[in-house]
Amino acid sequence: MRSSHPHAALALSAALCFCALHSLAQSTASKPVKLQDPRKLPAAQIQSDIGNVAWEFFAFMNWPELPNKRGVPDSTRSIGDPGPTVWESFKNESEIFLQNGLRPAGWEVKSEIPMARLHNSNPVGPAQPFQLSPAERAALGPVDSNWIHYLAEPIMIDGQKICSDDGNFIQYDVRSSRAYYDYVVNNPGRYPLYNIQGQQAALADPNFTFTFPTETLEIKASWRILGPTADASRYWTAIGVYWDSYHVLRSARIGLTGLHIISKALPNWLWITFEQVDNPTTTYTYNPATQNSCVVGQNGTPVGPNPSRNTSLDPVNQEWQKALSGTKWQYYALMDTQTDFVNASQQPILMSNSQMETYFQPNSSCISCHKISSIGPKQNLRLALWNTQNSLQPYTGAINFQDIVNQQYPGQSFKAMDFTWSLRNAHYKVSVAKKKPKPQAKAAASLDQPQPASTGR
């Protein structure tokens, strides 16, 4: 697998020269991790020192949030300090793409948790806003971040699931930065890209091209459920809510197992993926025989080591893990990065995360997959993710968007959405019909005319 990857030589070069390029690349015993926004780095530096830049993104994303300033780091604090991180305070996709397709609330408004019956507060009765009493919160166990995550996705992109070793499904949430949110809501074309009608209006405009700002960031996180007494010493922890199989919203302490970071810092975006170091032996493939639940000892095989992990990045990982010693972040490792479709030999570049692409890791290419993010006609809204139906064969290598359109839906019009599959979470806007006033009864022509008899209804 590594033979098809161009980053071996690049990462070796980074391992040799990173001392001259980054503060963290010097002796980490005496140099703490400093706050730096890597989106401001020159493109050439990003390309030449990709391993360290990936870690710079990781540090920036996991820096403590400035209280009540979503997505803004607190320069007075240090990475690893308790409290929500920068990315945790990004907008959840559930806050941007509302079920009714209406305009989302303002950036600072916290509205990600749906109205629902919560199992430990109100098991029956009408839906109501999510709340956790101090006693309920304490019962979940101690957490590093008090941000409440809505884990809107219980399955991976291929529709499958994986289990943790203590018998719970891995859960997911997707979050986006202020630049992403602003573009979806207030793009130059003034299209409401937060609903399908707005995206199709953009499709019909020959002068509109989906182009997100260079500051745009997207995050996808995978989480395991941690019981109140579970060992959470090697996981970044928070509070999560998710739907159970009975469609009741449950709350739990959650531990981070994987993190995709996607940045528009480069034209084809910069793709970065991290995993918690214990994943190979603490996460298992799902066994359908357990009937839609995870059963300890009865699920599939361990997901094992990530087959597309770039081992040439190990020296960079070790330096950063030393720098982060004493924080939960020392227990995370960079799996790989991706900045192009193919290597110098024109072979597809592959990258995956064992928590998010479990069943098609050997064929996973982030850039190739996201290149076909699309909006199309009403009868075929999106291009298909897979080369063939009912098989895990994603697109890899160089992608010509129009060629894929011609293969899948000849003669139909599609438009690329700048690598952002998250836009497919949009719903149709639901128009609220105005009630027509009831017609007034016509006055009788004459009081001595007979009136219609009542039907008694």
Image: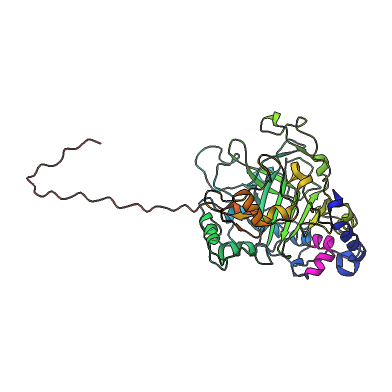
Depth check, front residue: 425 or 365: 365
| Residue at 79% over, 42% down | 231
Residue 51 among magenta residues: yes
| Residue at 53% over, 37% down | 124
**Seen in the image, is 70 located left or right of residue 364?**
left
The C terminus: image quadrant? top left
Residue 158 among magenta residues: no
The image shows residue 171, relative to residue 42, as above or below, that is above
How far across and how far down the image is residue 405, in percent? Answer: 62, 53
| Residue at 69% over, 43% down | 140
Q: Quadrant of residue 319?
A: bottom right
How far across and how far down the image is residue 67, in percent? Answer: 67, 62
The image shows residue 161, relative to residue 47, as above or below, that is above
The answer to whether any part of residue 107 appears in the image is no
Color theme of the render: rainbow
Magenta-drawn stretch, dominant element (helix, strand or loop): helix
Depth check, front residue: 231 or 197: 197
How far across and how far down the image is residue 170, in percent? Answer: 71, 42
**Seen in the image, is 288 located left or right of residue 275?**
left
Magenta region: which residues? 43-56
| Residue at 58% over, 61% down | 184
The answer to whether any part of residue 231 appears in the image is yes
**Seen in the image, is 420 located left or right of residue 328?**
left
Q: Quadrant of residue 86?
A: bottom right
Residue at far left of view: 448
Q: Quadrant of residue 216?
A: bottom right
